[in-house]
Amino acid sequence: MKNTIKVERAKKNWTQEDLAVKIGVSRQSVNSIETGKFVPSTLLALKMAMVFESSVETIFQLEDTD
């Protein structure tokens, strides 16, 4: 699964730490999700969509291999 978290963070001028605080996880968790090493839970994906004022589908996209 690919994502646009880095782009969305840049739009808001947030660091990984800023996002982590807003959604209640560690900076390392944000990094793992952002780099595709970890797939977030539905709850976490919804929290990200809420803080980015976007839809889950905008932030996360399935790839052909998923």
Image: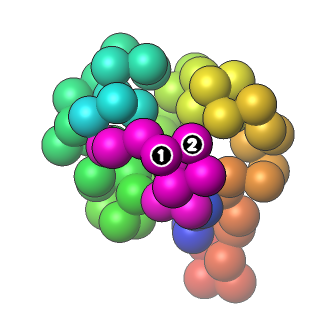
Q: Amino acid at mark 1?
A: Asn
Residue for badge 1: 13
Left or right of residue 10: residue 16: left
Q: Position of residue 37 (x, y in %)?
A: 31, 62
Q: Is residue 46 visible?
A: no
The stretch in magenta equals: 5-16
- The answer to whether the residue labelled 1 contacts the one labelled 2, judged by CB atoms less than 8 Å apart, is yes
The image shows residue 9, relative to residue 35, as above or below, that is above
Q: Amino acid at mark 2?
A: Lys
Label 1 crowd (10 A; few <14 / some 14-19 / many >=20): few
Q: Position of residue 39 (x, y in %)?
A: 45, 50
Q: Please state, as top left, top right, bottom left or bottom right, where the C terminus lies in the image.
A: bottom right
Residue for badge 2: 12
Question: Going 33% across and 44% down the picture, which residue do you hit?
Answer: 15
Quick one: SS at disc 2? helix
Q: Is residue 20 visible?
A: yes
Is-magenta flag for residue 11? Answer: yes
Question: Going 69% across and 67% down the picture, which residue do you hit?
Answer: 62
Left or right of residue 54: residue 40: left
Q: Nearer the viewer, residue 61 or 16?
A: 16
Q: Nearer the viewer, residue 6 or 1?
A: 6
